[in-house]
Image: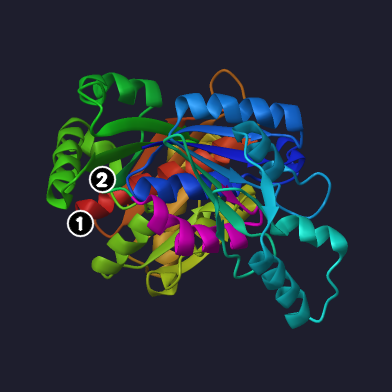
Amino acid sequence: MRAEIITVGSEIILGSILNTNAQYLTRRLGEIGIEVLYHTSLKDNKEQLKQVIKTGLKRADLLIFTGGLGPTGDDFTKEVVSETLGLKLYLDKNIKNNIQNYFNKNNKSMTPNNIKQAYIPEGSKSIKNDIGTAPGIFIEWENKILVLLPGPPREMQHMFNKYIIPLIKQDCIMKETTIKTIGIGESHLETILKDIINSGDNPTIATYASEGIVDIKIVAKGNNEDYVNTLLRQTIEKIKDRIAENIYSYNNETIEEVVYKLLKENKLKIAFAESCTGGLITSRFTKIPGVSEVFDRGIVTYSNISKMKELNVKKHTLDKYGAVSKEVALEMAKGLLEKTNVDIALSTTGLAGPTNGDENKPIGLVFIGIATKEELIAKEFRLSGDRTSVQNKASLNAFNELRKILLNM
């Protein structure tokens, strides 16, 4: 079954609120084997809605509407759907009583315009709203299904899960998994995996890039769960064979969560000394519940004086190589390791911009130092983007370098 989600509301188009309903419905429909082909959002405009309905009926089997079921004048989804399908509206006395009971229960007076919500199209099935006043509507029309749901996410989700899913659930099983990668661009990744991506339409494979990270989403479907699981497993193995060193999670974890788990498994403690990242690494890490088991401290040594005083970085090293250098990153990490007696110390120093870069040390130049009791290493990165982007990418690369070291400990 092919579906289209139609979101009605000027507030969506104007950007006043996020369209979380479309995101939620797409995910839930996929879980029950229904493929969403289109998302359509439009203002509170009757003629536009009429055209959207006509188009949707030509290209999808299931149309799900959210919004426009309230009591006010600009709530007209039900009326336009009925008119487009050639169905008359009639007053459902049971719905009217339910709405009246809702107001009585909440010690409120029901205004006359709420009666509007008790009208439904002929031949349709009303869907109870356990939370609000606007009932949902289920329509079967010429081998098509139209579902009208209220706009408030809490009402919509409850109604969809409790009442709509049993009416539309497919025999088809659909499962998805996400492989998270770092250290490889989306275009390069797609080139490496091109033959796997284009090998067929089941499973489907798509890449999604965000700052410094590329996700690979795999969706498999079938009538048998074992068959679907096998498809996913085989596809994951094929991808793993090509880019194993760039994969940090198969379970949709953040890279800092992966580092936390590796530290915990190895019973190791870590500390951070940050310059160009300004505490961002520490901030990301301390968002993880239970991180105190593996985390000792994080300090920001932004000035040269603080690097010397807090981390024992030599003045001679700073004078000779500059604060943004491999040598300083190494001394920062080593000094932190000795000062704290942790198992691993990580440092960052770099130029996040937008000023003070030159030909030898351009904006985006970052050094990451890592010290353990056995080794002392530093990595150089040339990162692109504005100040925030450079800092974010530096923090991601810092966690990735930790991940690689921890996997070999």
Q: Residues within 10 Å of mark 1 (few under 14, many from 20)?
A: few
Q: Which mark is residue 172?
A: 2
In front of the other: 43 or 282 = 43
Q: Residue type at mark 2: give it.
A: Cys
- What kind of secondary structure does the magenta stretch mostly adopt? helix
The answer to whether residue 252 is left or right of residue 171 is right
What label does residue 409 carry, if any? 1
Asked whether 139 falls inside the magenta stretch, the response is no
Judge depth for marks 1 and 2 and give the one in front: 2
**As rendered, which of 5 and 26 lies closer to the eye?**
5
Quadrant of res 310:
bottom right
Residue type at tag 1: Met
**Quarter containing the C terminus:** bottom left
| Residue 42 x, y percent position in the rendering | 69, 33
The count of marks equals 2
User: Can the viewer see residue 339?
Assistant: yes
The image quadrant of residue 181 is: top left
Q: Residue at x 56, y 36 (%)?
A: 390
**Eyeballing the image, is 317 above or below 226?**
above
Horizontally, residue 240 falls left or right of residue 99, namely left
Please give the name of the residue rendered at 37% of the width and 45% of the height, measured from the top-left corner. Answer: 30
Q: Give the camera-side residue of 363 and 124.
A: 124
Q: Which residues are magenta?
A: 148-169
Q: Where is residue 332 drawn, in percent x and y? A: 47, 51
Q: Tell me if 17 is positioned left or right of 374 in this view.
A: right
Quarter of the image that includes the N terminus: top left
